Amino acid sequence: MEPDLSDLDAHLADVDADGYLIFADGDESDQLYLAGFGAPDPFTTLYTPDGTHLLVSGLEYGRAVSESRADSVARLAEYDARANVEEYGKHEGGCRTRAAFLADHGVERVAVPEDFPVAMADTLRDLGVDVVPETDDVITEIRAVKTDEEVDHIRTAQRANEAAMAAAEELIAAADVEDGTLVHDGEPLTSERVTEEIEVTLLRHGCALDETIVACGADAADPHDRGSGPLRADETIVVDIFPRDKASNYHADMTRTFVKGEPSDAVRDYYEVTLDAQEAAFDAIEPGVTGEDVHDAVCDVYEDAGYPTLRSDEAAETGFIHGTGHGIGLDVHELPTVSPNGGELEPGHVITVEPGLYDPEVGGVRIEDFVVVTEDGYENLVDYEKELVVD
């Protein structure tokens, strides 16, 4: 994948910089995106309008040459020797190494991200490099618009996600009910057991995740409660899975709400109104509308049905108490936002649509799909049914 970095070129021109410098490990998504390569230890990526250049350890050199999209890859040891790292110590020596690397590429004034190490920036300045901290998330904003290849990576992650959701739903559906508790193979069926099934399924499909949500009853009324303990009949079970494809590093994100048994009238109403709210969001999505517009469409449905939202009551603790969605890609939460102050949507934005209602007395209901904004609307990238009751 070759990203369009014309906006980065424009940013460099705006701040009169010769290049853009990142020092971070491969877990930092802007680094991974710019270099096309990840490593467990921090490494240096320099972008200039003439090319992308990496400075990596000898341990990572071969892999960087074969895997990255860089125009050149240099060994750290060569520059360390030139900078006399042993004489100056690890910090100043490392900065001298990077100053020499910048000089070799004709960079005297360099832009850096806002989370660039402060001590390194100060020492580079002492060494004569003009360091310009970024005030805009320029690469994060570039990453928000996905190429067709990136969308395909997200589709792949989502197919694994759907297999994991099916495994979770089948486990819940197959459970017996004893004294109001779900039981599987003679043991109480717990959030932890369902999470295990999700994780194993994802691994078999080439994906991983650090955590997921399987929350029941009052736990489900807290949108980010991961859930724990036995699952209960007749109560909502919110299952929210957001895996990362291990080959591409791109994420998917999907939520379904299940009830094993008989949901209350309040839960049924929560579910139907949330479906209506999600459809209202879909109807609003097209290029040129804002994330705030889409969020307002959801709030309109909930408020018309008599439920509080943070728009109608910023102190609300029940009802619709979060944003409608977020971008998804190398990070599970990234730009653009679909919430108050959400900006204009463009073709190539991939966004979640996840309305929900929450009350500890009722439980929680959330339904989440995600879509790619197209030239004339959107395409839903999720192919998984929405059914409240499982049996």
Image (cartoon, rainbow, N blue to C red):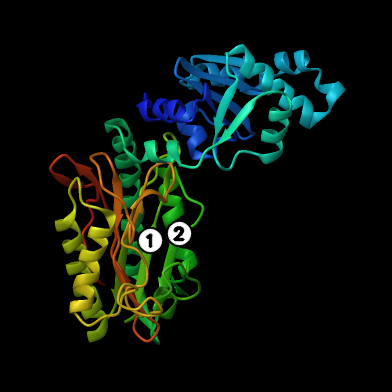
Quadrant placement of the C terminus: bottom left
Q: Kindly identify the amino acid type of the residue bearing the numbered disc 1.
A: Asp
Whether residue 88 is situated above or below residue 25 in the rendered picture? above
Relative placement, left or right, of 31 versus 150 is right
The relative height of residue 28 versus residue 362 in the rendered view (above or below) is above
Other residues around mark 1 within 10 Å, as few (<14) / some (14–19) / many (≥20): many
Q: Secondary structure at mark 2?
A: loop
Which residue is painted at 35% across and 50% down in the image?
A: 161
Query: Dot 1: what SS?
Result: strand
Question: Disc 1 or 2, which lies upstream in sequence?
Answer: 2
Image marks 1 and 2: residues in contact by CB distance under 8 Å? yes
Distance, label 1 to label 2, CA atoms, is: 6 Å
Q: How many numbered callouts?
A: 2
Closer-to-camera residue (389/155): 155
For residue 55, which numbered disc appears in the image?
A: none
Residue 282, percent from left and from top? 18, 57
Mark number, residue 212: 2
Among the 4 quarters of the image, the one containing residue 112: top right
Q: Which mark, by number, is residue 240?
A: 1
Q: Residue at x 72, y 27 (%)?
A: 95
Left or right of 72 in this view: 328: left
- Identify the residue shown where x is 22% and y is 83%: 306
Q: At which x and y percent is residue 155?
A: 29, 41
Query: Residue 8 in the image: x percent, y percent?
Result: 42, 29
Residue 3 in view, yes or no: no
Q: Position of residue 99 (x, y in %)?
A: 68, 21
Say above or below: 277 vs 241. Answer: below
Q: Residue at x 69, y 29 (%)?
A: 125
Quadrant placement of the N terminus: top left
In this orientation, does residue 79 appear? Answer: yes
